[in-house]
Structures are given as structure tokens and as C-alpha cells.
């Protein structure tokens, strides 16, 4: 029986955001937008979904006079990401067997 | 990148791997600037002080060294401010800490050597710089940087013991050039 893939992570943009946040302490919206190549609106919606699920924490503040949104992965998000990657590996190893 | 919920397991893993790799590259490329900036500053300062000392015969020109952090840190702050959206990573933090420790040791020992306890400060700083460079190479998993650090630390220590007075400053010129080259290596490696 294969583990069920987390539907929240099984989406290209949300998975990319989580992949970035898994490797850094925190990242601001500008960097996430640049790295994913997503539109600001779409990225914003997906970040909200991840935040609502408790996978990432979002902090809104200012850098100088400019508004700045900073995201960081939560322990819950990191665990979900690990589980997702392990599930993918199981799928792949079963496919090769 | 837009919404796509129809990825295969292979596509998902490839996406994770590619995204993480690109992110790591962007962060490390940003670190190259620090190596380059301090390398160029060190080269200019060491050459300038060498020329002043050589032409006037006065060792007092060495006090100009204390101006280097005063110029370097604001320049570094300005340089990083341009790309302040680049996040902090564990590797970047470690590199910063390695060179901060080097700066604290060098500055403290330089002050001691200048005003209280005469010592072969070039020998000490060149060894410290070589060690910091070597450890940076280990952190970045980059052999050319490790070798550069070893050449600077071990070769520089031998040369500092053999060279006299102002000629020792040229070791810092070599160190500065090696730092700048390190910056170029890091930048090209993570292009």
C-alpha cells in the first residue's frame, strides 16, 4: 500500500515554495517570486494556502519604507515535506522493482 | 511556474531537486561578492602601504590598515543591500562566522602588536587567513579554494619568516588576490 501524497504539496508552485523554504532560514516574497517565476498574485494565494495549513509562517513587515513579506517553514511543514519526499521515493522504488 | 497537480513522482522529485539547487546557487553566488570585495581591498591596501613604506622608509604607514574595516564594512553593507532579498543559509552563515572570527583575531592581535606586544604580525595574520580560506573551501566543498588556503597559510608563513619588513606586505597582496580569485571561483561554480 503506497502512502498517500499530501495534496497540498502535490502542486508545482507550492512544492517549489516548500523546497526553497526547506533549505533556508527564511525567505522574502521577492526571492520566492524570482526563484519560482510565478506571478505575484498566484504566489500570494499559494503562500496563504501553505500558511493556513500551518506548513509555513508568514510575517509581514517593512524593509525601510517598503512592505516586506517573510516566509519560513514550520516544524510541521518540514515534517510534511519529509513525508512527501519519502512517499515519492517509495513510489519510484516500487516502479523500478 | 503555475499550478500543476498532475505531476508524476519523478517530476516532483526533479522539481524539488532543481528548485533547491537553484536556490543554493543564488545564495552562494551572493557570498562570492564578499570574497571579491575584501580581496580587492586587501590588495589595494597592502600594495599602497608597501609603496608608502618602501619609498619613505617609515613603518608608521601600517596604521592605515585600521582604515580597511572602516571602508570595507560600509562597502560590504552597501553591496549586500542591493540584493537583500537573498535569504540566509547555513553555509552563508558559516562563511560569515569564519571570516568574522578571522577579523576579530587579526584586529585584536594587530592592536596588540602595534601598541603593546611586538610580534611578527604578518606571520600570524597570514596563517590565520590561510586557515580561514581553507575552512571556507571545506565548507563550500571546493578543492581549489582549499589549495589556495593551504598555499597562503603554509607558504605565506614560510615566506613571512624569511622576508623582512615591508616586503612582508606583499604576502597580503598575494592573500588579497587569492581572496578575489576565490570570489571568482565561487561565482563561476554557482553560475
Image (spheres, coloured by chain):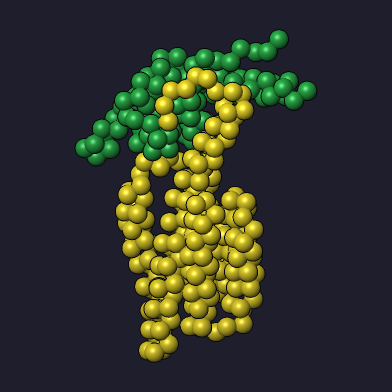
Chain colours: A green, B yellow
Q: Can the viewer see residue B166?
A: yes
Q: Please tell me which residue lies in front, A62 or B52.
A: A62
B183 to B155, vertically: above or below? above
- Give the left or right position of residue A62, taking residue B144 as reference: left
Instruction: Specify the farthest residue to the top.
Output: A1
Residue at position x 44%, y 75% from top? B46
Residue A65: which quarter of the image?
A: top left
Residue A27: tell me if it is visible: no
* x then y, percent, for residue A87: 64, 19
Residue B132 screen position, x and y as percent: 56, 58
State the image coordinates of residue A33 (x, y, percent, origin top left). 37, 34
Question: For the point 53% across and 67% down, which residue is it?
Answer: B178
The residue at the point 58 percent across, 33 percent down is B14
Number of numbered labels in the structure image: 0
- Relative to A78, is B86 on the left or the right? left
Quadrant of the rendered image containing residue A71: top left
Residue at x 48% of width, y 33% of height: A20
Give residue B22's position: percent from left, percent from top.
50, 41
Residue that protrudes farthest toward the left in the picture: A65
Measured along the vertical axis of the image, is residue B97 above or below residue A85? below
Q: Quadrant of the N terminus of chain B?
A: top left
* Residue sitting nearer the eye, B46 or A20: A20
Amino acid at each position: 500500500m503506497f502512502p498517500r501524497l499530501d495534496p497540498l504539496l502535490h502542486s508545482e508552485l507550492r512544492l517549489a515554495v516548500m523546497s526553497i523554504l526547506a533549505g533556508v532560514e527564511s525567505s522574502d516574497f521577492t526571492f520566492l517570486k524570482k526563484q519560482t517565476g510565478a506571478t505575484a498574485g498566484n504566489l500570494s494565494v499559494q503562500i496563504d494556502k501553505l500558511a493556513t495549513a500551518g506548513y509555513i509562517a508568514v510575517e509581514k513587515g517593512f524593509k525601510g519604507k517598503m512592505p516586506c513579506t517573510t516566509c519560513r517553514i514550520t516544524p510541521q511543514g518540514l515534517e510534511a515535506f519529509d513525508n512527501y519526499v519519502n512517499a515519492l521515493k517509495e513510489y519510484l522504488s516500487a516502479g523500478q522493482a | 511556474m503555475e499550478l500543476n497537480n498532475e505531476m508524476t513522482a519523478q517530476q516532483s522529485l526533479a522539481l524539488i531537486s532543481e528548485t533547491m539547487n537553484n536556490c543554493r546557487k543564488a545564495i552562494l553566488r551572493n557570498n562570492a561578492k564578499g570574497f571579491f570585495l575584501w580581496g580587492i581591498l586587501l590588495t589595494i591596501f597592502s600594495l599602497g602601504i608597501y609603496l608608502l613604506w618602501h619609498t619613505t622608509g617609515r613603518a608608521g604607514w601600517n596604521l592605515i590598515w585600521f582604515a580597511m574595516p572602516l571602508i570595507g564594512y560600509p562597502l560590504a553593507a552597501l553591496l549586500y543591500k542591493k540584493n537583500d532579498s537573498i535569504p540566509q543559509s547555513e553555509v552563508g552563515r558559516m562563511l560569515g562566522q569564519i571570516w568574522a572570527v578571522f577579523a576579530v583575531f587579526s584586529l585584536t592581535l594587530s592592536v596588540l602588536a602595534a601598541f603593546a606586544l611586538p610580534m611578527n604580525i604578518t606571520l600570524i595574520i597570514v596563517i590565520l587567513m590561510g586557515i580561514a580560506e581553507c575552512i571556507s573551501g571545506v565548507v563550500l566543498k571546493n578543492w581549489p579554494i582549499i589549495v589556495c588556503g593551504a598555499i597562503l597559510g603554509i607558504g605565506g608563513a614560510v615566506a613571512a619568516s624569511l622576508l623582512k619588513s615591508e616586503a612582508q606586505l606583499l604576502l597580503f597582496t598575494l592573500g588579497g588576490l587569492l581572496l578575489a580569485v576565490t570570489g571568482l571561483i565561487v561565482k563561476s561554480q554557482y553560475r
